[in-house]
Image (cartoon, rainbow, N blue to C red):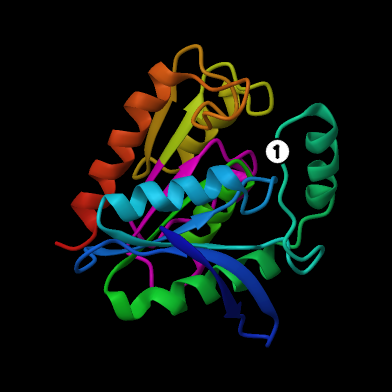
Amino acid sequence: MGQDIKLTASDGFKLGGYRADPTGTPKAAIVVIQEIFGVNHHIRSVCDRLAGEGYVAIAPSIFDRTQPDFQCGYSPDEIATARKFIANPDWAAMLRDSQAAIDAVKDVGQVGIIGFCLGGSVAYAAATKLSGLSVAVGYYGGAIVRFADDKPKVPTQLHFGEKDAGIPLTDVETIKAKRPEVEVHIYPGAQHGFHCDERASYDKASSDIAWPRSLAFFAKHLGK
């Protein structure tokens, strides 16, 4: 359904990405921000699913500044390799690259953003700092608590697993206390990565609630 693309950030850096277009006139556009595993099979499938819902979906390769076209799976060795990318994350660069993706699809109409894991944190930061967005959704972003003093400029929905080993519920409660206007959902028994059906931590019951909830949030704030 989709194709590999090239984007140019505001500082002139050229990065790759993936774009999926719906059949027929798109409702709006959604930027998809990757996990630490790159714009891999799972992120591409998320884009394809969103295209199936009528949205132009675009996923910028936000690790291209470090290693072009990095993508991997979920074995212990691959996870260890992927973690090196977030040892000292360049949030400003990732936001520039996210803005490039927003700008690339704004001719479609309204633009939303969704991110998972690292991308969940980037999506939240984008909601507070970037221009051109109408709505944001973040899944299990571990750094969101560090950004919680920043108020999103657009309606924002967040999803967390109750049993996420990397995001204690105290962090989620801090986010809820600081940002009462943000819609926060906690999924009982779910671990980190519960939405990804290629990971051992996949929780179908939680994902089957979270995904329609996300789509309803997009439908409410995009293309209306």
Q: Is residue 155 above or below residue 175?
A: below
43 on left or right of 200: left
Going 67% across and 21% down the picture, which residue do you hit? 165
Quarter occupied by the C terminus: bottom left
Q: Residue lying furthest top in this view?
A: 189
Of the residues shown, which amino acid type is indicated by label 1?
Gly
Mark 1 residue element: loop
Q: Residue 71: horizontal and vertical position, in percent?
A: 71, 51
137 on left or right of 140: left
Going 29% across and 35% down the picture, which residue do you hit? 213
Going 39% across and 34% down the picture, which residue do you hit? 184
Q: Residue 150: horizontal and vertical position, in percent?
A: 52, 56
Q: Bounds of the magenta span?
A: 129-157
Q: Is residue 57 above or below residue 130?
A: above
Quarter occupied by the N terminus: bottom left
Q: Residue lying furthest bottom in this view?
A: 12
Going 80% across and 42% down the picture, which residue do you hit? 83
Q: Is residue 84 magenta?
A: no
In the rendered image, which residue does mark 1 sit on? 73
Q: Residue 91: horizontal and vertical position, in percent?
A: 69, 61
